[in-house]
Image (cartoon, rainbow, N blue to C red):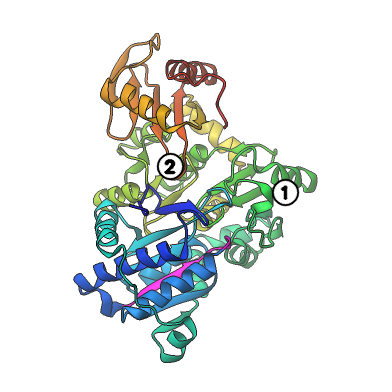
Amino acid sequence: MSIQFGTGGWRAVIGDGFTKANVQLLTAALARKMRAERADQRGFLLGYDRRFLSREAAHWAAEVMAGAGITCMVVEREAPTPLIMFAVRYYDLAYGMAVTASHNPALYNGVKVFTRGGRDADETVTARIEEEIAALEGQEIPAVPYEEGVRTGRIQIVDPMNAYIDAVIRSVNMDAIRSRGLKVVLDPMYGVSKTALQTILITARCDVDVIHERRDALFGGRLPAPNSKTLAGLRSFVLENGCDIGIATDGDADRLGIIDDRGEFLHPNKILVLLYDYLLRHKGWHGAAVRNIATTHLLDAIAAEFGETCYEVPVGFKHISGKMLETGAVIGGESSGGLTVRGHIQGKDGIYAAALLVEMMSTTGRSLSELYREITRRCGSFEMVERGYRFSQEERARIGRTLMEDKALPDFGVDIQRVSYADGCKVYFRDGGWVVCRFSGTEPLLRVFCEMDDAGRAGEMAGRMEAFLGLEGRNIE
């Protein structure tokens, strides 16, 4: 089958898998599912980011929904994915869709499907869509021309941006931020966060500069993912202009990257830890945390300190949001930079997370590095290394067979407590460290994550896994 969903929707190379025919096929399959559930009368919502063909693909999808007799709302502006998720909840719809490939390289595009409340579609939903796709392949798909759909009202243009911005403003302590007069620089990475995030921070009387704000479908030749390598320009701006914080978001603004006042990149694990501790210690909230298998166990230590629980789930934010709903957790997140907080949307939101971080700095009057050092003094040191490897199909089969079928492991030189195969292979060591090896669900990479009490030890353990799998010298991270 040409369309298969991964951990973050469906993504494919433009002109190869990502084509007009496939976008229409996926949309027609979702329309069939909606009619079968009698959800078609509630309508549908579509949005898109700044990638090449995103706007056109959103129009192709809207034409198919209109052809299926389903009223389709279109956010007719380049919009953050969190805004689209918010809008699905705001308009009380059963389904919505964002055309985006998030942080993937520029040659990719894709589709994220959302369900009631603005949640990422889970495997049950996406498996059913794939079944409908299989049933529709080869059939003619009815479509109404976009302009005709707009003229007849079958396609409706909407703009929930102000409602979204107001919702974020209501969720943070704007008075505390106003009292500080912080100097902030934003890096949308040529993506879609500028309007919302700049408006929120200026409303809070921050002094705001923006870099990399224009549309560039090639993302300046960089990966549109905020990490220590891609944020060199942001780091330079922070240091040269004496900024209190540099804030970056990925291509569709659901992930966050931070450069602190000293020009240091703040790993997403640290952001998640800082916010969970802040919500419990300073705001007096109560509740669990949820993280995926490749995210820091320092969250577990903080939860234990407050008599709470930290739940572990597979990679994919749909698992995090589902567990948060089940447990009433305070926060959920992942080491790749996505997080959400109870009471906001049930999905990743880099814009809201950034606003909450600025609130934390303003309320505590302390730098992010100071706050993090205090946490590690209480809870201990947790150091992570991350590695990524490209592979051939033969290597994928060999690695999968070695880890998942033969269940073979390298000699780590330490006692193993247990091994989980729920999502890749995760080895838990008796001293509290761990290493996980899994194939990415969003791009063709094998990923290895390792966390220990010392960065050197973490690198050593990751290296043992690398050597065992015959991948020495091929790390691209």
Quarter of the C terminus within the rendering? top right
Residue under the point 27% across and 20% down: 406
Q: In the image, 141: left or right of 370?
A: left
Residue under the point 51% across and 37% down: 270
Give how far across and how far down residue 26 sits, in percent: 36, 63
Residue in front for this viewpoint, 375 or 246: 246
SS at mark 1?
loop
Q: In the image, 325: left or right of 237?
A: left
Magenta highlight range: 43-52
In which quarter of the view is residue 476 placed?
A: top right
Give how far across and how far down residue 139 sits, in percent: 30, 68
At label 2, the amino acid type is Glu
Q: Which residue is mark 2?
A: 334
Q: Is residue 35 magenta?
A: no
Q: Which labelled disc corresponds to residue 243? A: 1
Residue 326 visible (yes or no): yes
